[in-house]
Image (cartoon, rainbow, N blue to C red):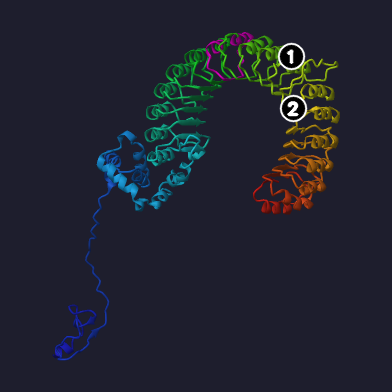
Amino acid sequence: MSKVLDFSGGVDFCSGGFLYQNPKKSSLFGRHVDVYFPPRKRSRISAPFVVSEPKQQPSIEILPDECLFEVFRRLPSGQERSACACVSKRWLMLLSSIHRDEVCTSKATQSVDQEIRSSPETVDESTEAKVKGVFGDLKGAKSENVEEYQEIDSHGHLSRCLEGKKATDVRLAAIAVGTSSRGGLGKLSIRGNSSTRRLTNNGLKAISRGCPSLRVLSLWNLSSVGDEGLCEIASGSRSLEKLDLSHCPAVTDKGLTAIAMNCPTLMSVTLESCANIGNESLQALGRHCPNLKCIIVKNCPLIGDQGIASLFSSAGQVLTKAKLQGLNISDMSLAVIGHYGSGLTDLVLVGLQNVNERGFWVMGKGQGLQKLKSLSITACQGVSDVGLEAIGKGCPDLKVFALRKCPFVSDNGVVSFAKGAESLESLQLEECHRITQCGVFGVLANCGGKLKALAFANCLGMRDIGFGFPLTSICNSLRSLTISNCPGLGDAGLCMLGQMCPKLTHVDLSGLKGITDNGVLPIVQSLEAGLTKVNLSGCVNLTDNAVTSIAKLHGETLEVLNLEGCGYVTDLSLMEIARNCSLLSELDVSQCGITDSGIAALAEAEQLNLQIFSVAGCSLVSDRSLSFFNVLGKTLVGLNIQRCTGISSGTVDLLLEHLWRCDILS
């Protein structure tokens, strides 16, 4: 017992705590005794020890790509595949490499898929968001694109547009995986620039495997995408209907030929500035695309007569719209178009420098353009009076004709064309400097009674003639007359035009600095129908007399009035407009002599419902017009107060606050 009581603590005894585990039990002393020993310092262990490594847990990542491929293609639904794509870039690229035909579609898988789709608890919203930050290249493509996938075009297809640095292989892979369970992507547009570096053919491969229903593909300014990517699209997306290639130097005839041979539903093709696409591509399109309706070829140096001739000789009966611009073609191509283009309704020819007078003459004489309704010719030096006359006679159903920057066409050619084109409804001439006022009168007298719109712009030959033109016939069919930026035209010529066109409803005299009230008033007073649109911008010599006459005589029908740059127009005009023009929706009095009083008159008008109002450059308009703008703002959707030096920044802030529904330019 003494030994026990005298015990001072050894290494073999408990270092601290109760002597017995349960102190309530009987002890050696016969009654309850609490014996406690304080803890003491642990003894240092000098012997070396080895820490065993934890056992490595098995991971699916150790499986090779072949095994993961087999696993992924057996996933029961698109949601599971999308969730797996969020794990890593490796998994995403593997999933994007699975063709839809390779996905396992067993009955068991389908039943599980139906159960998952029917259960609301399976929708894991966090999975969609987890892609953000999984890997930097994607930057949330999956979750970020969920809303963008909902963008549906007019045909009901899912649409996606990538621009600049957003266009990468990883993003295209995410699009392919994310849309595969929703019917696939229907429209894809990629706009490249100097920062588009991580987009290659692999991105298009992913789209071709996951989006077999792709119908529209547009590739612009992409140097890293070539034939390999287009060949994949051709083999995987055979429902392609529209292809747009612009500035794609890596694409050659091989890629486009593959598209033509594998996509029989192709309806529209646009080729612009593709330096390595040549005649072989157009030949393939003509032979293998029976549904081709529209072809646009711009600035492709390798495309010549052989390609154009082959295309139109094979598909001329099917093609309805064609545009040829900046091509190295000759008279032969136009001859083929004039003979075989029996299905054409719209034709645009721009910058054909190697086509001569004979080419346009033969095109008109070919008698193949019987269905042509719209023709536009721009910057073609070979157009002459002879060719224009032949086109007018060879296109009996032509309704719309535009001729721009053709310096060798004179009055004789335009009048002969008007006589031949008996169905002509709209004629536009721009920068044709040999056209004079005699040509205008000749067109009005010989248009066949169907001409509705006549426009002349930047024609330096338009000058007042020194003799009177016999008004043998009046053009009662003309509704719209535009004479823009023709500096030689004055009051005398304008009066004669007004007498020949009594049924005008649209008048555009913008940029005619030589006309005054004496030229405008006879037209306004002689018109039998009410004017609805009037553009007098740049007519610097007009005054309130002309504007007030327009407001009084045509206020009940006037909808659009543009007086920009008419410095002599003052508040008097705005007061008459406020009294008479109840239907006016657009008013532009920029750089006019109006003040706050004029704005107040408009605000006090009870029946005025302006939607677009511009007072840009009106230095006499000040902060006092704030309340007037607020009243007008009840109906305004657009307000332009730029360069109004009398309006302070504080007033602009108040306008932005009060007129929050209106777009304000300040």
Of the 4 image quadrants, the one containing the N terminus is bottom left
Residue 276 counted in the magenta span: no
**Does residue 224 appear anywhere in the picture?**
no
Q: Give residue 498's position: percent from left, percent from top.
A: 79, 24
**Does 522 sit left or right of 642 as displayed?**
right
Tell me residue 633's x, y (percent): 70, 49
Question: In the structure shown, which secondary structural element does the residue marked by tag 2 occupy?
Answer: loop
Q: Amino acid at mark 1?
A: Asp
Q: Which residue is mark 1?
A: 411
- At mark 1, the secondary structure is helix
- Is 629 drawn above or below residue 436 in the view shown? below
In depth, the one of 386 and 644 nearer the eye is 386
Q: CA distance from mark 2 to mark 1?
A: 23 Å
Say which of 629 and 21 sits in front: 629
- Name the kind of residue labelled 2 in the image: Leu
Residue 337, magenta (yes or no): yes
Q: Which residues are magenta?
A: 335-364
Q: Residues within 10 Å of mark 2 (few under 14, many from 20)?
A: many
Quickly name the residue at label 2.
504
Q: Nearer the viewer, residue 269 or 389?
A: 389
The numbered mark at residue 204 is none
Q: How many marks?
A: 2
| Vertical order, 4 against 363 (above or below) | below
Front position among marks 2 and 1: 2
- Mark 2 or mark 1: whose residue is earlier in sequence: 1
Q: Quadrant of residue 638?
A: top right
User: Which residue lies at the image location 73% right of the left edge and 51% below the top edge?
Assistant: 631
